[in-house]
Amino acid sequence: MAAAARRAPRRVPIDQRANLLLVGVVATAMGVQLFAWPFLLRQWGAPMLWLMVPLVLLTPTHWGLIHESIHGHLFARRRLNEWAGRALSIAFLLPYDAARFGHLMHHRFTREAYDQPDVHEGANHRVLARLGYYAHLLGGLYLGEVVLPLLTFLPVNLVRRLVANKLKSDAPVDRDIQRLFVAFAGNKERRACIRRDWMLSLALHALAFYVYGAWWPVLAVTMFLRGVWLSVADNLPHYDVKLDEPARARTFRVSPLWRPVLMNHHLHRLHHEHPTLPWTALSGLAPEGGEPTDAGYFRSALRQFRGFGHLR
């Protein structure tokens, strides 16, 4: 009975109206964050700082829409789906092509050696590893993705060598991962797209900082907090997950109020088990008793700060 409840069609319709509504909300929030907020701050002063709260809270929705585009679930029309995802990525200072490749590799090679930011295997000093882990959680993941496009300005052969050395391993799976990453790093078309999008992102945010004037630290702090949320949320579903756990991912409990904000990211194990389904279909996969969960979403997010996870 439980197995039947979990069985789902490979394809279900995309709820384009729900996605369009969320795109409108996020686009409005980005317009406020980048250009309207400085005028409100100059007009009304410190009370307008409270706008930071909804702008930061919409971080998982912004990423969730990009994520749906990566999987082809944002809009039914392929060009519109990619265009919207790319535009949302530019507004978030994320390289869309690199994020798409990295995320799809994450699905294919979940929790493999390159995909274990919470694990310390003794390759470097534990103190340095711990500092690196907390830096990763506190915005390091986001910062790494922001500066990643710099590699596309380097010679192709140099980037290939850098990537190959970073992912060097004798394990068969690791060699396959290395080969795919090196091939992507040398793809001229993707490199050009990443450079173009990054320049657009820099121009957009440079203009925003100019508009903010003396209030520019407000924009910087907001971007930092959004980067921290993204970094923490990205690590959460796989933190301390052992290699024999289903889909090498976990699901969590969360209030119904948060589900559209998180775009059901708390059901991450279901997403890994059914990656062809849009976010709106995931909640329907749980049995009547509810999807078995490990803990509350936000409590588990804080649990990551206790220290390293384990594989076995």
Image (cartoon, rainbow, N blue to C red):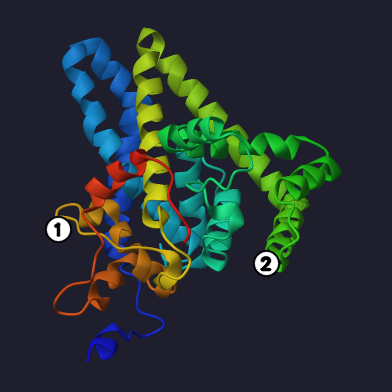
Q: Give whichever of 223, 305 is nearer the camera.
A: 305
**Residue 241: x %, y % from top left:** 41, 59
Residue at (66, 47) in percent of width and height: 193
**Residue 260: x %, y % from top left:** 23, 56
Q: Quadrant of residue 215?
A: top left
Residue at (46, 59) in percent of width and height: 69
- Residue kind at label 1, given as amino acid type: Pro
Q: Which mark is residue 173?
A: 2
**Residue 65: x %, y % from top left:** 38, 54
Classify residue 53 as left or right of residue 95.
Answer: left
Vertical placement of 75 versus 122: above or below? Answer: below
Task: State which tag comes first along the sequence, 2 or 1.
Answer: 2
Label 1 crowding class (10 Å Cα cut-off): few <14, some 14-19, many 20+? few
Residue at (42, 66) in percent of width and height: 73
**Residue 1: x %, y % from top left:** 22, 92
Q: Quadrant of residue 221?
A: top left
Camera-side mark, 2 or 1: 2
Q: Alpha carbon of mark 2 to alpha carbon of mark 1: how far?
A: 39 Å
Classify residue 192 as left or right of residue 269.
Answer: right
Secondary structure category for the residue under label 2: helix
Classify residue 263 as left or right of residue 175.
Answer: left
- Can residue 311 be spotted in the picture? yes
- Can residue 80 be spotted in the picture? no
Label 2 crowding class (10 Å Cα cut-off): few <14, some 14-19, many 20+? few
Please count the marks in the image.
Answer: 2
Secondary structure category for the residue under label 1: loop
Q: Residue 57 carries which label?
A: none
Q: Give whichever of 299, 233 is nearer the camera.
A: 299
Q: Residue furthest right?
A: 157
- Residue kind at label 2, given as amino acid type: Val
Classify residue 15 as left or right of residue 82.
Answer: left
Q: Mark 1 points at which residue?
A: 256
